[in-house]
Image (cartoon, rainbow, N blue to C red):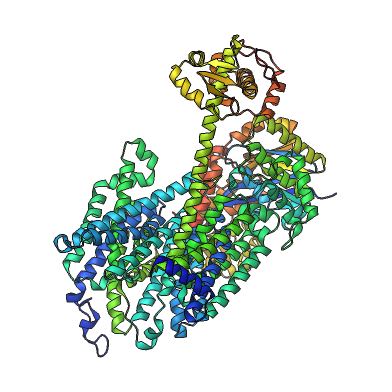
Amino acid sequence: MSFAELTGEFFLSLLGQGDAAQATINAILGACLAGLTCGALGSFIILRRMSLFADMLGHAVLPGVAVGFILAGSKSTPALLLGSLAAGLLAAALTRAITSYSPIKDDASLGITLSLFYAIGIWLLSWITRAGPELSSQSSGLNHYLFGNPAIIQTVDLVFLVSAAVVVLALLRLFFKELTASIFDPAFTVSIGLSPRIFDGLLLVLLTLVIVVSLKILGVILVAALLVIPPATAYLLTDRLGRMIALSAFLGALSGFGGVYLDFVFGIGVGPAIVCLAFLWLMTAFLASPHHGVLGRYLLQKKLELKTLRENLLTSAWRIGERGGELTAIPIGELASERGEEPSATRVLARRMNGSGWGRFEKDLLVLNSAGQERACALMRGHRLWEIFLQREASLAPDHVHAGAEEIEHFLDSETLLELEALLDNPETDPHGKTIPPGHSKGRTP
Amino acid sequence: MSCLPPRFWPGLAATELWFDWEIDTWPLLMALLVAMSCGLLGAVFLVRRTALLGDAVSHSVLPGIAGGLLLAGIVLENNDHVFGASATMLFVLGGALAAGLASTMLIEALHKYSRIKPDTALGAVFPAFFAVGVILIRLAARDAHFDQDCVFYGSLEVIGELNQVIPTLACSILVVIFFLCFYKEILISSFDSQFAGTLGLPVGLVNLLLTSLLALAVVVAFEAVGAILVIALLIIPAATAQLISSRFDRVLLLSALFGLSAAFFGSWMTVLLEVVGFETARAPTVAVFAGLQFLLALVFSPAQGLLAQAWRKRALESRILEENLLGSIYRLSGGVSSQGFRLKEIAAPLGYPPGKLGGALRRCRARGELDVDRETFSLSARGRERIAGIIRGHRLWESYMIHEMGAASDHVHDAADYIEHHLQPGLVKELEELLGNPDLDPHGSEIPGAEGAGA
Amino acid sequence: MTAPPIEIHDLTVSYDQKPVLWNIDVEIPEGALVGIIGPNGAGKSTLLKACMGLLDLSSGWVKIYGDPIEQQRKTVGYIPQREEIDWDFPITVRDLVLMGRYGHLGLLRRPGAEDRKIADEALEQVGMTAFADRQIANLSGGQQQRIFLARALAQESRVYLMDEPFAGVDATTEKTIVKLLEQMRSENGTLLVVHHDLQTASEYFDHLLLLNRRMVAFGPTEEVFTEELLRKTYGGHLTVLSQAGEAIRQSKSGKK
């Protein structure tokens, strides 16, 4: 079937009846619920720097699945859940014991527990698949706990997922302020009479719970990804914890839905598809987030560079005007000699004044409007005040202050300027003996 | 071990309890080689506190391996019999190296160019790479026969000829040669990379080689033990070694050794377990055995083990009890007379129930530090000598606290009681010099002479 | 006689079995603005943390108005060191200050209108109202210190423990902070402030606590800020102390 046909069938099955449609709907519900819960809890996990711990726990619940299966003799969901819950908590205890009673460091101890528990799990699974018919006939599908497979999601799994989601979201809501405080500032939390350890314990229990119920969808190796990647994405997009949690839960659920869809169409496996999608959002945010993205910051820097370049032209123009020249339309030749560069270079720069709102390049002239003249005046004033400040307060030699002022003039805001004026008693000349343009000038030319 | 008695297990021949060399030679050799190179490399990364790099690399080379297989399938489609498995291997290796490198660069970029913290970057990137790998493997498995299970379980069992071991053998030789040639550089750059840089050592090159070797080892281990179990071989033998020794060279050797023993005994365990009807895959058994070794070391290591720690704690407690017992008699007797005291009298100033001193009493008597006269105990010359040093430390410390630390004289006794058991001779000497060898402590009691002869 | 705001008795604190503060004895009087002065590694922050009950004590006790700290949590406000804060944490200035109310709220309850009002007033007092909706990384060093002061104000405590509130602050902001501290003291507060700079110590504080692993002196600034005592604080025979600490650690962890 073609891509379009499969897509059509996918969405039709959402409305449809019958076993196949029901399986798809179950898969979608399961994946979305898992994504939602993981996303919400994950925000606290990455802020608490438990990302790698979550990864460890994900791998470490495997022997619990195997033991639960062996003891129950079937793939009874509650048995497997209980087993993995126990394995997860045991792994957490072992990690802690290793770091407290031996010289082994945190991260190594995580690696040891992860690989040890995972190995035991795989070891037991390898036995189950080879064991006598009474076990191995039951065991088909146990491998789904490795990669996850929502196609095997049944109503009982959904019940567990919904209950886990309700419990996790309710507890996060109830203890929101305590969890926030204990992660952000543990010392402060103690100082108001709360123990961060209790909230660490709460996070640990919730984390194990979420991992255990999400296992069938994502599998042991990938489950931690959904706890780390959507929150990391949200972390790049917002500065508020509440929004971060909501966004991360949304991204998790979206990845869950998208993953089931991609698997339906391309047959690439739901778990891996969910993780790849989630990672795609992360990469997008990493590149394009307005404040914390690479692209956003690159553009911001470019904008700043352009502003600096334009302002430097303005101050050069001001210097020409100061010597009695024209400040409304400056010939490029004059500007070039003032700046000590080739007229062709200046021409290139002057063209970039277009669109600045300060003036434009026209007939080999740099034409400044009143806003441009005002800005030039303010810049010069800031520059020269700063020179005086450097000379007086930092005792720099007069011939050393220019470079510093050249840089700072672009960043002086009106508040700082006022402070400088007050500090320096509104001086009239700078250290080089040049007049300081008066403040609040209305485009006055000297 | 091959000389097990023939009827070790009733009804079983000895041959069933031992390797069947016709089948087991190559898998065992493979396991040994993989475990040794992983042990050596893992130890370096553990000592450098980047133990999880192995974790990350082992997950993230999967797309490289799968991609390499896919690409090899396309490029070598009809020529496979010409180039043979070695050409496919090259594709897989290249892919894995590229993927390993890409993932480490991406992790670096994520936390360098955004506010994402390093652990989150690590935790986000390697599952993502693994997911891509799983998808690629599914695609590869559609065209060719590719056993998905070996990603998890490894496939030591199916190794049946020398050909399949050769890449691993080459890798192990490379690792050993690298360690022999660059031992000094590895040591210094692991210990203090800035210092190594100032010495003009090629730190960057050594690190690059180490990471590349790690990726290489993970790739050749992939066939044997699967994608994830290799972490166990990278980290657990190294950690076991670190529990036994803290010297770099010994940690390296021990780590390789523990890897080898896990491979050998783990493989043997598979054979034995099969006999009792517990059939398991070989690779996870090796990993589990490595874990077993670790847990044993955690408890029994002579240097760091839990037992040794508990033993030392007990020894310290007994020593403190003995010293308190002797000290109490010394103080009761005023430091000079050889008057005897009853146990109850001795225990009273210490605030102990008399029974608590029973063990200490027995040990001190056995050592001849106490003279017994019916129910009373007094210090022998030897006992006096031992305790005079402690009392001297105690009283010097009180003087130090009052003169140098400006402590109030009614506060110093408890602190001195505590510290007297821990003062070493060098420190006592320093206190003497600092305080000008005083004769009396702040309470006016005499400070026993350095020779410990009392008066 | 009422109990003093802070009373420390024979306090010894150890890290990893190794004592870092030895036998501290001090009573801080009501309404004092105390600077804790001493060289690097003298245990200044450790002393504050011990007062807050953040550390296990090897010996001695700390009492706040005659009670153990656990019973006086609401009386004590704490400002942590800059380096201990994750400035990238997704939290706004207002939410941070609101955190000061958590101790009064107790479990499960969420801040109400009254708490918001108190938090806004605290922000107003430190002159940071305009920045209320900013994320805390987008502030200058001085502004960051001021919002933590605001959080302490919102706690409505009587005793404040501050770990280097002047770190990373320019001279002008430092003056503002000093004014705030004086204001807090005049409103019946007792302040214990870890301070790094000897130059300004005598100017800012009315009491000084000279500390270098043991307490060298405590008293009104004019009595304590003497050359002899300062020399004792910054010099002195302290190698013995650290050697003894190391000896205890080794014999306890069983290394030869």
User: Which residue: 63% across, 20% down?
Assistant: A373
- Residue extending farthest front: A363
In the picture, residue B42 is in which quadrant? bottom left
Q: Is residue B133 above or below residue C209?
A: below
Q: Is residue B389 above or below residue A345?
A: below
| Mark count | 0
Query: How far from the left and from the top, in percent, is residue A233?
Result: 52, 54
Give the side of residue A55 with respect to residue B445, left or right: left
Q: Is residue B359 above or below residue C26?
A: below
* Residue B396 or residue A324, whichever sits in front: A324
- Residue extending farthest bottom: B11
User: Which residue: 74% across, 49% down?
Assistant: C7
Give the side of residue B194 with respect to residue B11, left or right: right
Query: How far from the left and from the top, in percent, is residue B400?
Result: 60, 42
* Residue B319 or residue C15, whichever sits in front: C15
Q: Is residue B180 above or below residue A392?
A: below
* Residue B292 or residue B278, whichever sits in front: B278
